[in-house]
Image (spheres, helix red, strand yellow):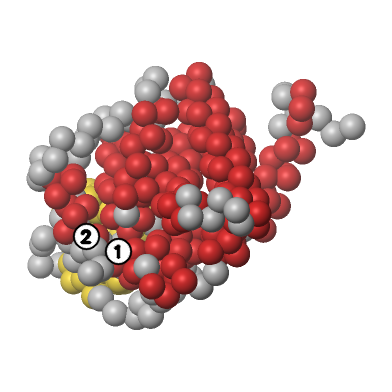
Amino acid sequence: MMCDAPALAVRIVTEGDLDVPLPGRGDTADRFRILTELCHRDISTGRLVEAHLDADAILADIVGERTGFGEFWGVWAAEPPEPMVTAERHSGRWELSGAKPWCSGVVSCTHALVTARDGDQRRMFAVDLQQPGVRPERGGWTAAGMRTTETGTARFDRAEARPIGAPGAYLERAGFFHGGIGVAACWFGGARKVAGALYTAAGRRRDDDIAMMHLGAVDALLAQGQAILSHAAMTIDAAPDDIDRARRLAAQVRWSMEQIATDVIDRVNRALGPEPLVHQREHAQAVADLGVYIRQSHADRDLVNLGRLVVDDRNLPEARCR
């Protein structure tokens, strides 16, 4: 049976004892550990909980507030050329109108942080989704991967909203990049989940040199991923407000974790063949979920940006061009 990811995510957030440190406050490693474990259990559920935790961190960063008891938040910040959401001020209140695609938890979320266009500027708003001016729409998701994340389009018709910081505040802070590394921690948890099938099968294949080769490689890859996250957490806690360092670190970690996840999927498939993909529903779903999830990476474009950051960052000895 397919996991009801939204319902489980809501229960984890609103009914459990979820206590996750904010990034950059000295316990970032514990935050990344929790995100990893959530996606190790179920990738879609972990992705939805991560969005709620990211909203909590954004609110704390920008306005010094936290999400409320019983609330389940999304962060809806996709900005395709069309459609778009616009923000206008009428009689002292802000209102959002338009359509926002790629909204995960579009039905289950009670609140969301939504980016909208305020003239020619991008601005973030907090929206109570239970008001009449908000209409969630499902549909259009044909992929098997991440199909249980309830991703759809949110339509706003003069929905009341509260601005979170000045225009650009969402992007112009180190915490934006810390959040991006949190997503990479989720990718790592997904890679661990996919790798589980190989670890389980290993005892029956001890004399299979090819399976042992791939198991060794996967084990080393996961150790590498853990080391990367540990280093990232220490770096964030040492300089929580350094946006330049955070920007470069996020690009490094996200690209590295994408490579690890991609290689783990490939090696597990090559070691075990089609059997777990066609007979183990949970494993097949995890492979599909992770394949879609890591496409939140901008792939080669991120490497181009990282290369430019390296050239521009002349304060670090290792960044100097020789």
Give the position of the C terminus as an image quadrant. top right
Q: Residue at x 56, y 43 (%)?
A: 219
Q: Nearer the viewer, residue 290 or 284?
A: 284
Q: Is residue 23 left or right of residue 245?
A: left
As drawn, 201 above or below 314: below
Mark 2: few, some, or many residues within 10 Å (few <14, many ≥20)?
A: many
Residue 119 coordinates in the image, percent (x, y):
41, 59
Can you see residue 229? yes
Q: Which residue is mark 2?
A: 6
Amino acid tagged 2 = Pro
Place of residue 271 in the rendered image (x, y in percent of width and height, measured from the top left)? 58, 61
Can the viewer see residue 111 in this picture?
no
Q: Secondary structure at mark 1?
A: helix
Which disc is residue 149 wearing? 1
Q: Residue furthest right?
A: 322
Q: Is residue 126 left or right of residue 279?
A: left
